């Protein structure tokens, strides 16, 4: 049961209309693909109300997704299955390094100069308004893969199977008694590049991309009472991974289950939320990390 006070808090958040984000672009084989090419689109505005009655009415494209939303919204973005069949499938080699880029403008405002001829070979930029494509929330970038069941076309797969985390980009040089420095929470975030593990078995996969802002708990705000829930910004690419690997994928996690408020990394102290200091034993959300070889508890390496 999610009480009314919490929902009121969410509504207050939701009024900050402008400039959240969605990952909308992939660079593979050294080339930026088109906006939303290979990435399932979302429906906007979209009504989560029917799923959870106390939820607020509608959300726009770049607005956050919460754990009280529909499971499909938490997995791959609002109404993504409606767009899956018309989304292309990107063939990639296991071991390939790719880059992704996000967009903060709502689709109705998209213009070519937000995607093409961007400085520094970025996949997105924001010439006109003088905005850089930064992130307006602190938190870790999380990349997960989920393999479609054998014989099932990825364009019909809803992500209800297991997900394996293959990349996290979190804190820069974390120290227990220093302010936090989130790697992507900067005026000019670095390029988001990562590798599809070489050991990934061949097959069709969803790749979930998210930069998650954890929820908060304090003396005054308790989990499940009145407080804030983590904000998620998921979107999913449809991949066909070509691979020589005979390895098996490790066991994964289920979504939305792993993003419940009591799961590791999903709720922090107020101090951590305000970037004042790192919580003891903080673990990045989204389950353990597979480095292609081992499955690791996904924690920042704290310098002291
Ligand atoms: C993606 O969805 C948005 C909002 O629903 C819509 O405005 C836009 O035209 C769609 N884009 C593509 C490429 O389908
Ligand atoms: C965060 O780390 C970056 C990269 O090392 C550095 O340039 C920046 O000054 C740091 N910010 C703070 C507030 O320490
Ligand atoms: C620390 O975090 C790990 C991973 O999330 C968890 O398994 C463990 O129980 C935590 N330890 C304590 C003392 O909270």
Image: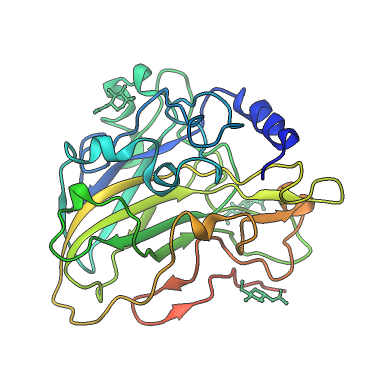
Residue 74 appears in the rendering: yes
Residue 8, by quadrant, is top right
Q: In which quarter of the image is ligand 3?
A: bottom right
Residue 191 appears in the rendering: no
Q: Where is residue 108 in the image (x, y as percent from the top left)?
A: 35, 17
In the rendered structure, the answer to whether residue 214 lies left or right of residue 59 reads: right
Residue 229, by quadrant, is top right
Q: Give the residue at x 65% y 33%.
A: 10
Viewer-nearest residue: 110 or 145? 145
Viewer-nearest residue: 110 or 56? 56
| Quadrant showing the C terminus | bottom right
Q: Position of residue 37 (x, y in %)?
A: 21, 38
In the rendered structure, the answer to whether residue 122 lies left or right of residue 226 reads: left
Q: Give the residue at x 16% y 36%.
A: 86
In the rendered structure, the answer to whether residue 54 lies left or right of residue 132 reads: right
Q: Above or below — where is 186 with respect to 46?
A: below
Viewer-nearest residue: 86 or 6? 6
Q: Position of residue 286 (x, y in %)?
A: 50, 61
Colouring = rainbow
Q: Name, please, the residue furthest toward the right.
A: 219
In the rendered structure, the answer to whether residue 232 lies left or right of residue 121 reads: right
Q: What count of labels does the image hold?
A: 0
Q: Above or below — where is 56 with respect to 275?
A: above
Q: Where is residue 254 in the image (x, y as percent from the top left)?
A: 43, 62
Viewer-nearest residue: 53 or 157? 53
| Quadrant showing the N terminus | top right
Q: Above or below — where is 30 with respect to 51?
A: below
């Amino acid at each position: 049961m999610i009480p009314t006070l919490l929902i009121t808090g969410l509504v207050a958040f939701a009024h900050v209309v402008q400039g959240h984000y969605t990952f909308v672009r992939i660079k593979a084989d050294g080339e930026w693909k088109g906006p939303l090419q290979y990435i399932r689109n979302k429906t906007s505005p979209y009504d989560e109300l029917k799923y959870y009655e106390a939820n607020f009415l509608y959300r726009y494209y770049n607005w956050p997704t919460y754990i009280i939303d529909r499971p499909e919204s938490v997995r791959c973005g609002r109404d993504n299955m409606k767009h899956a069949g018309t989304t292309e499938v990107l063939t990639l080699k296991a071991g390939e390094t790719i880059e992704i880029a996000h967009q903060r403008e709502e689709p109705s405002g998209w213009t070519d100069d937000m995607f093409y001829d961007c400085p520094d070979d970025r996949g997105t930029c924001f010439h006109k308004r003088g905005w850089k494509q930064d992130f307006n929330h602190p938190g870790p970038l999380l990349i997960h893969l989920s393999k479609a069941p054998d014989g099932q076309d990825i364009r019909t797969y809803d992500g209800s199977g297991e997900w394996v985390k293959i990349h996290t980009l979190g804190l820069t040089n974390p120290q227990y008694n220093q302010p936090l420095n989130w790697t992507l929470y900067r005026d000019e975030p670095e390029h988001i590049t990562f590798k599809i593990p070489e050991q990934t078995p061949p097959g069709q996969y969803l790749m979930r991309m998210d930069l998650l802002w954890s929820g908060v708990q304090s003396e005054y705000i308790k989990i499940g009472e009145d407080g804030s829930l983590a904000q998620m910004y998921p979107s999913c690419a449809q991949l066909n991974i070509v691979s020589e690997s005979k390895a098996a994928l490790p066991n994964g996690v289920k979504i939305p289950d792993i993003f419940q408020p009591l799961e590791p990394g999903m709720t922090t102290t107020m101090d951590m939320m305000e970037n004042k200091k790192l919580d003891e034993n903080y673990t990045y959300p989204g389950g353990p990390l597979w480095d292609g070889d081992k499955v690791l508890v996904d924690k920042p390496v704290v310098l002291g």
